[in-house]
Image: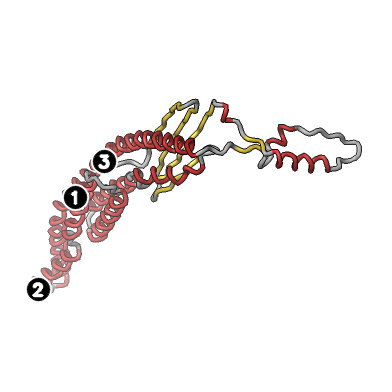
Amino acid sequence: MLSSMTGYGSVERADGGVTYSLEIRSLNNRYFKASIKLPDGFWHLESEVDKLLRAQLRRGSVSYSLRIRNQNATAGYDINTAALERYLRGICAAQPPEGVTATVDLAVVASLPGVCQPPEPDDATREERQRTVRDITAEAVKKLVAMREAEGRALRDDLLAHCSEIEHNIAAIQERAPAVVEEYHERLTTRVQELVAKAKLELEKDSLAREVAIYADRCDISEEVVRLRCHLEQFGLLCDSDEHAGRRLDFMAQEMLREVNTIGSKSNDAEIASRVIAVKTFIDRLKEQVQNVE
């Protein structure tokens, strides 16, 4: 079954005074691309999160954002006193311009790089965090995948509806094609008879038949129609397959467009030309829609 590349999943969980809030969004992308945002103290989990996402999602631009609220006493940052003292010595050693007085704001100094540092978790805390992040990531990805599958079902129905319209127009083209040769034969015969009558000449029937045969061969679209119908059949099978078919569907749509372009170049007929335009319109819709398929 088809799956869309657009989806959303979120999870909130409280565990031991720590509240985890996770959001995962995915958008269209030709390849898999993950943007992972983790809070301080959780950066070591980035590779683990990336593996979890890749295991479930084949294509798409995925945005992963985890926020943490720690209400425990251990949430406070450690003060790097050596770094703080070095900043203060440098500030005190600076000579302000004459007539200017300055005061030191410790809050500002504390925000300087290296002064406040998150506490380093012990092994038990690391393992607990990793387990919690793994669990909520799996739950959020499950919700995201469910949304992508629901949208994929709607995409499938829309794609197959376009395929049905393409088949309808192909049938009309195939039905019209023999009449084009017959009408050409009649027009050519009438024109030749008029010219021969004026010039008082005779024309061999074999020459006329040969000219009609050449025209019939030049505008023969039977092979293109067969290939186009084969591509349509393969397209429908891919829509109902269990594989991730987005790229293959895009390829099949390109091949269908190639065949219908050839039909249009071969057919010197207004009705067929109109049908060709209709088919190309529906193929363009297929190409646009399959960009959303994983």
Mark closest to the chain's N terminus, 2 or 1: 2
Q: 10 Å neighbourhood of mark 1: few (<14), some, or many (≥20)? A: some
What is the three-letter code of the residue carrying label 3?
Arg
Q: CA distance from mark 2 to mark 1?
A: 46 Å
Q: Where is residue 246 shown, x and y percent of the image?
A: 31, 48
Q: Residue at x 45, y 46 (%)?
A: 47
User: Which quadrant of the structure image shows residue 94?
Assistant: top right
Tag 3 and tag 1, C-beta contact below 8 Å: no
In the rendered image, is residue 101 in sight?
yes
- At 23% across and 48% down in the image, what residue appears? 238
Element carrying mark 3? helix
- Badge 3 is on which residue? 156
Q: Give the mark nearest the N terminus, 3 or 1.
A: 3
Q: Nearer the viewer, mark 2 or mark 1?
A: 1
39 and 228: which is toward the camera: 39
Q: How many marks?
A: 3
Q: Quadrant of the N terminus?
A: top left
As measured in the structure, the alpha-carbon distance from the residue carrying label 3 to the one carrying label 1 is: 14 Å
Inter-mark Cα distance, 2 to 3: 57 Å
For this rendering, which residue is in front, 80 or 36? Answer: 80
Q: In the displayed structure, does residue 80 sit left or right of residue 210?
A: right
Q: Can you see residue 65?
A: no
Helix, strand or loop for disc 1: helix
Location of mark 2 (residue) = 204
x, y percent for residue 138: 37, 37
User: Dots 2 and 1: beta carbons under 8 Å?
Assistant: no
